[in-house]
Amino acid sequence: MAAVRRTGAFGKSDIGTASGLFLGGGGVPKQRVESLDVAHDGVVGDRQANRIHHGRPWQALCLWSTEAVDHFRAEGHPVAPGLAGENVSVTGLAWERVRPGAQLRIGDVLAEVSSYAIPCQKNARWFLDGRFDVMHYRHGPRSRVYATVLEPGAVMAGAPVLLEPDA
């Protein structure tokens, strides 16, 4: 894989875009912003209403696929980017490859996916009949993910998101 890094020969599904950036003062929804300052312990200025279940170091970033959001919208769910608490909406990655252990370069930030995000009941309002569990990872590659920050830095809207090849 070192040769892939040197040549930049990544597959199409290995490069996406940070199509939306979000932060909030606590809870959901989060507000769209043009840039994020990401520290080891999370996004500067972002707060979680429930610190027991959210906001720990291994949950420093929350990411979600815009294709997953589009899938749910096509089913009639009134969800949209930023509503479910994600900090980064990612467009164009093969989301089934974004799983625990995967590393992502997002702008200047290097993050490692630590876990799938268990759906929170606060998101029930964005889903028909309150069925927020449809975004659980057991239903396929439509779950949000949490990530640990390995290298802090800045992320601008539209920044490339690179799924790092295995070392």
Image (tube, rainbow, N blue to C red):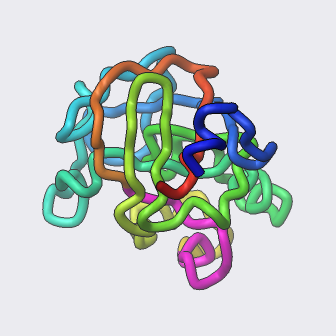
Residue 81: percent from left, percent from top: 61, 41
Magenta stretch: give its range.
133-146
Relative height, residue 24 to residue 94 (above, below) = above
Residue 47: percent from left, percent from top: 23, 39
Residue lying farthest to the right in this orientation: 74
Looking at the rendering, which quadrant does residue 109 occupy?
top left
**Between 68 and 105, the one nearer to me in the picture:** 105
**Between 131 and 58, the one nearer to me in the picture:** 58
Relative height, residue 152 to residue 28 (above, below) = above
* Number of residue marks: 0
Q: Is residue 88 magenta?
A: no
Looking at the rendering, which quadrant does residue 59 occupy?
bottom left
Relative height, residue 22 to residue 75 (above, below) = above
Residue lying farthest to the front in this orientation: 3
Residue lying farthest to the bottom in this orientation: 138
Residue shown at the point (18%, 40%) measured from the top left: 41
Residue shown at the point (64%, 50%) measured from the top left: 65
Residue 95: percent from left, percent from top: 66, 59
Q: In the figure, is residue 4 to the left or right of 30?
A: right
Residue shown at the point (62%, 27%) measured from the top left: 160
Looking at the rendering, which quadrant does residue 40 occupy?
top left
Residue shown at the point (59%, 38%) measured from the top left: 5
Residue 102: percent from left, percent from top: 48, 58
Q: In the figure, is residue 115 to the left or right of 5?
A: left
